[in-house]
Image (spheres, helix red, strand yellow):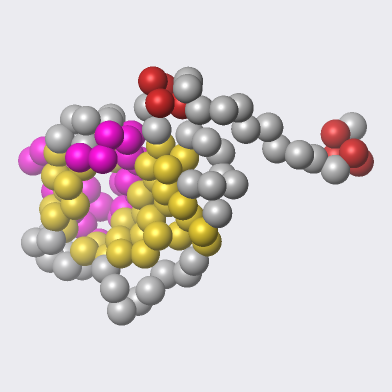
Amino acid sequence: MIISTIDTDDYWSCLIRRGMLHSETEAIEHWTLAPGQELRLGTHGVHEALLLLSGTATFSGETLAAGSLLLAPALQLATLTATTTTQVLSIRTYPGHVTRVLPARIPELPEAERAI
C-alpha cells in the first residue's frame, strides 16, 4: 500500500493506492484544480466519488460548492470544471464485475480483537 501526503507544489497527489487496502478501492487522491481546469470522469473504468473540499466547480450545468459530493459511475464520461481554485478528494472503486474476480481479502485481526 502506498500512503503519502498532499504535495502542495502539484495539482494531484495520490494519498492511498490499492494494495493492502480493500480490494474494491483503486485509489484515494487529492486534486487542486485551477479555475477552468477540468477533471475528466469515467475514463478509468472505475466508479468515482468526488468530495469538493473547497472552491466551486460546474458539472452538467450545475454549480457545486465546498461540501458537495459527486458520484460518477464507471465508464459514464463526464467533466468537472473548476470555476475557482478548487480542492477535490476523489475515491475510486472498482465496479462489481472486477471485484467479483479478485481474491477475497480477509483482514487478519489479533485474537483479542476477534472477540469484540
User: Which region is colored magenta?
Assistant: 43-68
Q: Position of residue 54 (x, y in %)?
A: 31, 61
Q: Residue at x 25, y 52 (%)?
A: 65
Q: Position of residue 47 (x, y in %)?
A: 33, 34
Q: Residue at x 8, y 41 (%)?
A: 61
| Closer-to-camera residue (37/110) | 110
Q: Is residue 28 above or below residue 83?
A: above
Q: Quadrant of the C terminus?
A: top right
Q: Quadrant of the N terminus?
A: bottom right
Task: Kindly tell me whether residue 116 is visible in this rendering.
Answer: no
| Closer-to-camera residue (105/7) | 105
Left/right of residue 56 with respect to residue 12 in the rendered view: left
The reply to whether the magenta stretch includes residue 52 is yes
Question: Does the magenta stretch mainly form a helix, a strand or a loop?
Answer: strand
Quadrant of residue 48 in the image?
Answer: top left
The reply to whether the magenta stretch includes residue 39 is no
Left/right of residue 26 with respect to residue 102 in the rendered view: left
| Closer-to-camera residue (26/112) | 26
Instruction: Determine the residue located farthest toward the bottom in the rendered image.
Output: 9
Q: Residue at x 76, y 39 (%)?
A: 108
| Closer-to-camera residue (80/69) | 80
